[in-house]
Amino acid sequence: MKVREGGGWVLCADMAISLLESVDAFVFDCDGVIWKGDQLIDGVAETLSMLRSKSKAIVFVTNNSTKSRAQYAAKFISLGIPVSQDEIFSSSFAAAMYLKSIQFRTDNKVYVIGGEGILEELRLAGFTALGGPEDAKKTVELSENRFFEHDKTVGAVVVGLDQYINLYKLQYATLCIRENPGCLFIATNRDAVGNMTALQEWPGAGCMVSAVCGSTEKEPIVVGKPSTFLMDFLLKKFNTDTSRMCMIGDRLDTDILFGQRAGCKTLLVLSGVTTLSKLLDPANSIHPDVYTDKVSDLLELLGP
Amino acid sequence: MKVREGGGWVLCADMAISLLESVDAFVFDCDGVIWKGDQLIDGVAETLSMLRSKSKAIVFVTNNSTKSRAQYAAKFISLGIPVSQDEIFSSSFAAAMYLKSIQFRTDNKVYVIGGEGILEELRLAGFTALGGPEDAKKTVELSENRFFEHDKTVGAVVVGLDQYINLYKLQYATLCIRENPGCLFIATNRDAVGNMTALQEWPGAGCMVSAVCGSTEKEPIVVGKPSTFLMDFLLKKFNTDTSRMCMIGDRLDTDILFGQRAGCKTLLVLSGVTTLSKLLDPANSIHPDVYTDKVSDLLELLGP
């Protein structure tokens, strides 16, 4: 067992045993941890089964807002991993729960830059949502007398990952935030990039969120990781202390920071966006407790 | 003559006379000063004629990068204002001149998020430019084995106002900046919004530039206002001291700041994006020397 300078400890058998003993609940990120795009990462299903067999609680907390919890549950099941919907906490759900937590008026509408998952969670929570996929193909021609109408009853704009980002959506969101009095600007998350496909990283929600920051000169309320907004929901679910929880993720600035802010143990896996050299770079100031290549190293070190 | 708290002086006849006496060269912003969208602002043509008749030098410095200098000259002439191309300094031109100033290798390519004007200026300066309008209609489907190819010889990405912003362009720019060693990230400007049509403001280049900041976690080199990069070109042209130049613009954070940083006199007009209440807002820290409603107030106060 040896420390790598600045990077935290490399996971070894002793440490894996000690982690299992000191943790009641494992909180997993999904992209880059459980899967890449639509491909399950090797050994994940078996590792999750092992943890469940040892009576560990498991939840999934993902910044990817394109899906609702129900859509995530379907994806897990299609990949052969049994989960229930209430083990899934997505940033789309977080956006809806944030609005509920501040008693956002249901006669105000919510404009969405992002995927169907956000709209579905907002509607499930009783809100009226506009935008999202239905504005994907809309174009604007900047002719002289073009006047862009927007709904004056929009009281919040939620921005997440949107592969169909366009000027129509950006103008709609900008007008709501700049012109509707008190309109909130909520970001599901600000991940710079993510593995939207297995082979490559793509601009993440941080791209679309920053675009709206650029046009509105406002900063958003972030509800996904590293914001600890969702932690209250996890605590209610687990009935344990955060010190007996372990956050497992592939991103330093969201997963590991989220875990640290909440007081959890943190395990970085190198199967996603963070490379070893990035972790060990002196410019990096976020250090997990432990790191390893992939989730299934736990299984390998602990046995089935 | 009275001062408005924090806002600078209101232009009056005495001050207009003193401005005319102490200034050899007037530097005009275009959008919100000369025109709004494609509509000339009342009295502009006559005011410019009056200044020229008094042997004042005139140039136009615009952050709007969608047009090249030649395209701007054509727009001026179509609106009945005689100009020569070398009186026009656009941020598209600034981007090309910046690359020339650093001796950017002409065997490296430049990827553009923005309009035809940037491509035209880059090509006139001898560079090979990709992207821009030809990528306007391109889409990407995030299928599992999709691999997005990008040109490894791109050594600079230039981002300006782009009404056809889409994921294709954002991914292209992001890959170049993140993966091509030493690739530069240049912003024509970072205006949050602008009067792209006469009736309304729209997201400005600041929106597209911030989107790329969000996905790359890098900050750009800004070549348009308030950067004073273009000032060397103006000084060569005018052969006068910046203290004998007056910047006339409608934006505090670009025009007035540019003028102040360069040591020019500054005149804010309220015919564009800055309202009187924004100017006088205690949160505003940028104060012009003088302000007035519109350019033609100069003509009214001075006579023809």
Image (cartoon, coloured by chain):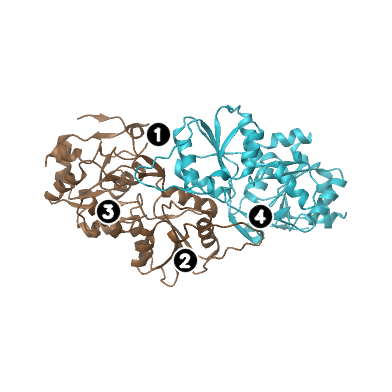
Chain colours: A brown, B cyan
Q: Secondary structure at mark 4?
A: loop
Give the residue at x 27% y 35%: A8
Residue at the spot of label 3: A75
Which of pointers 1 and 2 indicates the residue nearer the eye?
2
Disc 4, disc 2: CB below 8 Å?
Answer: no
Residue sitting at the far bottom:
A107
- Separation of marks 4 and 2 at Cα, in angstroms: 32 Å
Q: Chain of mark 1?
A: A
Q: Which residue is mark 2?
A: A155
- Amino acid type, mark 4: Gly
Q: Are labels 3 and 1 on one chain?
A: yes
Residue drawn at (59%, 56%) of the image: B202
Taking the spot 53% from the left edge, 39% from the top edge, the residue there is B220
Which chain does the numbered disc 3 sit on?
A: A
Mark number for residue A53?
none
From the viewer's perspective, is the residue at label 4 or at label 2 nearer? 2
Q: Quadrant of the C terminus of chain B?
A: bottom right
Left or right: residue B247 versus residue B216 is: right
Q: CA distance from mark 4 to mark 1?
A: 41 Å
